[in-house]
């Protein structure tokens, strides 16, 4: 897969998600470093004023490798609801992929944007 194909897939997923009327605005920036390496960033605003800020630095040379990612979701008052990332911590957490909530940080699997958007949709609809 090429970085441009991945970015196009993300754009399509955002467009499909906007059909459910939970998404108000979206911004997406794709910074292609090579055909197989790039940085994808975006901001999604939802009907309740909550916002998802995301970024992924991706390398497709051998497999899809997320060198760096962050999916930061906050409410309309800018209070953290959750954040997935793989940033190093000091002191070390003992694992790379993790999820922050207002009360804790736990090990997680590195999600895709689609997974995060579905988690937000479930939150917004009470599912």
Image (spheres, rainbow, N blue to C red):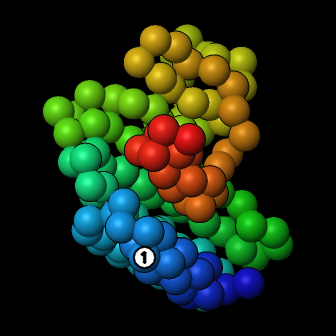
Q: Residue at x 52, y 13 (%)?
A: 104
Q: Residue at x 40, y 72 (%)?
A: 18
| For residue 95, side relative to residue 104 (left or right) | right
Q: Residue furthest left?
A: 77
- State which quadrant residue 127 falls in: top right
Residue 24, given in percent of the width and then of the height, sits at 26, 65
Badge 1 crowding class, 10 Å Cα cut-off, few under 14, some 14 to 19, many 20 or more, is: few
Q: Residue furthest front?
A: 126
Give the quadrant of the N terminus.
bottom right
- State which quadrant residue 5 falls in: bottom right
| For residue 22, side relative to residue 55 (left or right) | left
| Front residue (pair 49, 96) | 49
| Front residue (pair 45, 85) | 45
| For residue 120, side relative to residue 79 (left or right) | right
Residue 34, given in percent of the width and then of the height, sits at 56, 84
Q: Residue at x 74, y 67 (%)?
A: 64
Q: Secondary structure at mark 1?
A: loop
Q: Residue at x 69, y 33 (%)?
A: 108
Judging by the rendered image, the residue that carries numbered circle 1 is 19
Residue 33 can be seen, yes or no? no
């Amino acid at each position: 897969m090429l970085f441009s194909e991945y970015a196009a897939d993300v754009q399509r997923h955002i467009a499909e998600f906007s059909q459910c009327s939970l998404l108000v605005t979206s911004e997406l920036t794709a910074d292609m470093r090579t055909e197989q390496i790039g940085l994808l960033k975006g901001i999604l605003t939802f009907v309740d004023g909550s916002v998802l800020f995301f970024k992924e630095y991706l390398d497709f040379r051998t497999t899809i490798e997320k060198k760096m990612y962050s999916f930061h979701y906050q409410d309309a008052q800018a209070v953290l609801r959750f954040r997935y990332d793989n940033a190093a911590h000091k002191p070390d957490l003992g694992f790379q992929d993790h999820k922050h909530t207002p009360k804790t940080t736990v090990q997680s699997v590195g999600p895709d944007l689609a997974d995060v958007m579905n988690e937000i949709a479930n939150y917004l609809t009470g599912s």
